[in-house]
Amino acid sequence: MSDKNCFEPICEKEDILNFKSKKRSKLQFEEESSTQECPLKRNIYGNYTWNVLHTTAIYYPDEPTQEQQQKMRNFFDAIAEFYACKHCKAHFQKDILKNPPQVASRKDLSIWLCQRHNDVNQLLGKPQFDCSFENLEKRWRTGCQ
């Protein structure tokens, strides 16, 4: 199944009903996505993007300078402008206009991003994440130490 309004390979995705019912290990998922020399499909591209965004947010300064705050706002503006999936990009553009990036601290940014991710998960019928900062810190920064 693909986005009818987007003809780029990034818009191709697995059928969401079949994707949900398939029981695949994380290793199988990584093998499937890394062994093919093809453009990324939307679900894989999205997963990688969320990983980068959450990791970036959790390593953002606790007390960023005004310049760092502006750069982070610009970072999210750039993602909203240049994201390859047209449907995803349009949703994210609307979402960050309604809910601008909270860049005052690492905690604020991480929770804000988790809430944005939960908005997308809700649209896709996926489970919601616990957006407590303690949970985010453990998941994206300290969990496997």
Image (cartoon, rainbow, N blue to C red):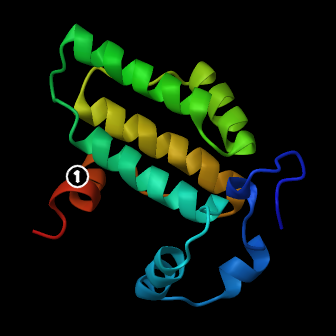
Vertical order, 6 against 2 (above or below)? above
Tell me if 89 is positioned left or right of 46 in this view: right
Q: Position of residue 40 (x, y in %)?
A: 59, 62
Q: Residue at x 42, y 35 (%)?
A: 112
Return the residue nearer the eye: 111 or 52: 52
Tell me if 38 is positioned left or right of 101 in this view: right
Q: Residue at x 56, y 55 (%)?
A: 46
Residue 61 visible somewhere in the drawing: yes
Return the residue nearer the eye: 43 or 98: 43
Q: Which residue occupies the extreme left position in the image?
A: 145
Tell me if 6 is positioned left or right of 144 in this view: right
The kind of secondary structure element at disc 1 is helix
Vertical order, 144 against 42 (above or below)? below
Q: Position of residue 114 (x, y in %)?
A: 44, 45
Q: Label 1, on which residue?
A: 137
Tell me if 7 is positioned left or right of 62 in this view: right
Q: Position of residue 80 (x, y in %)?
A: 58, 30
Q: Position of residue 99 (x, y in %)?
A: 55, 24
**Quarter of the figure that contains the C terminus:** bottom left
Vertical order, 135 against 23 (above or below)? above
**Quarter of the figure that contains the N terminus:** bottom right
Return the residue nearer the eye: 144 or 26: 26
Tell me which amino acid carries mark 1. Glu
Residue 132 visible somewhere in the drawing: no
